[in-house]
Amino acid sequence: MKKSLLTLSLMLLTAASGFAQSTCKVLGTTPDIADGETIYLEKLEKGLSRIDSTVVENGQFAFSIPATKEFMESTILVSHRRSLREGASTRVIIEPDATLKATLAYDYKKCRVYGSPLNYINNVYSDKIIEYSERIKQLQETSDDSKEKEQQVEDIYNEMVKYQQEFAYQNLDNILGAYLVSSYSMVFDKDFTAKCLAELPEKWNDYEGIIKLREALAVEAKTAEGQPITDFTMPDPKGKDVSLSQFIKKNKLTLVDFWASWCGPCRKAIPGVKALYEKYRKQGFGVVGVSFDSKKEAWVKAIKDLDLPWPQMSDLKGWDCAASDLYNIKAIPFTLLVTKDGTIVARNIDGEELLEQRIQEYLK
């Protein structure tokens, strides 16, 4: 079998340094991937980055991976791509001096990694998540559109999140727990996340995911209800620089709507926001749109197509929008409700009824 580039680099590094470096070997089989196909070793951060590759021979492949802190604390995937839209992948937990046996298949239920304690635990977790996902999928595929069905789906989802929280808490001493706490903080209960952060072993204080989570929570605390807005300036559709605060000062109460032309849920929510705007604008209610678009043409077209009557602003940087870091926005639509003096009175209100209640409360 041909040696992968990472394996060759590791051999050279070991020879040059004069001592053996701890490695993790991955010996894989591919039941439905043909010989000659390329298997990739990838690292998941903001996106996927390929760090090595090898070729399938006799239905098998192999990687030898340095068991460094970087790799052991990263989300490492073994994957194959049939096309841009179709691929197979499985996560590999890197452990020192381990020889792992992996199965990579397009039937995700067959994907497994054995050979070390953490990979076994991850298999147990993955099986449970697959079970919950299959139950939700089966319900969603039925023709029943009743509220009872919606409630059943929600109940299963909440059950899954509860399991994830329990699993994370039981594994705070290893990378699986640290990863879940840092990656699912938007889903997990805030009190639960705080408890995990308080009880995390010190060794995770320099784990990138935990560092970013603590930074994000600090931003949320700074922009929570009762706190003043963090102002920012961006161009309006005509290219003129405008600040968030200049619009807020014009109204008794302002809804700051973070959205994008490509965001389906954002567009779906707009009719409800427009109805509230028309109903309460004469009483001092205003709206400001902050777009996460990256293409001006699409942004301006959406404003016209949706007939948005309120001011708009965008730095056209997509998810790198300045507001994203300033308010820890990880998903849109996202909203802030702000009083005339710049005080945040609500953050990401869920539902038109609740939003209207808050509007009425502050426009008395």
Image (cartoon, rainbow, N blue to C red):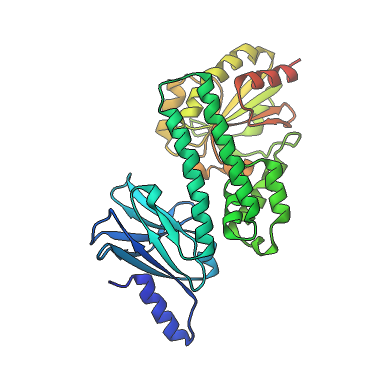
Judge whether 125 appears above or below 239 on screen.
below
- The answer to which of 52 and 148 lies nearer the viewer is 148
Q: Give residue 353's position: percent from left, percent from top.
A: 63, 18
Left or right relative to 153: residue 335: right
Which is more toward the observer, 200 or 347?
200
Question: From the viewer's perspective, is 132 left or right of 276?
Answer: left
Q: Report x, y in % for residue 337.
A: 67, 28
Q: Quadrant of residue 262?
A: top left
Res. 336 in view: yes
Q: Residue at x 48, y 82 (%)?
A: 20
Residue in the image at 69% along x and 13% along y? 283
* 102, above or below 142, in the image: below
- Residue 161 lies in what quarter of the image? top right
Picture quarter with the N terminus: bottom left
Q: Nearer the viewer, residue 9 or 225?
A: 9
Residue 133, image x, y percentages: 47, 39
Q: Is residue 318 visible?
A: no
Q: Residue at x 47, y 35 (%)?
A: 135
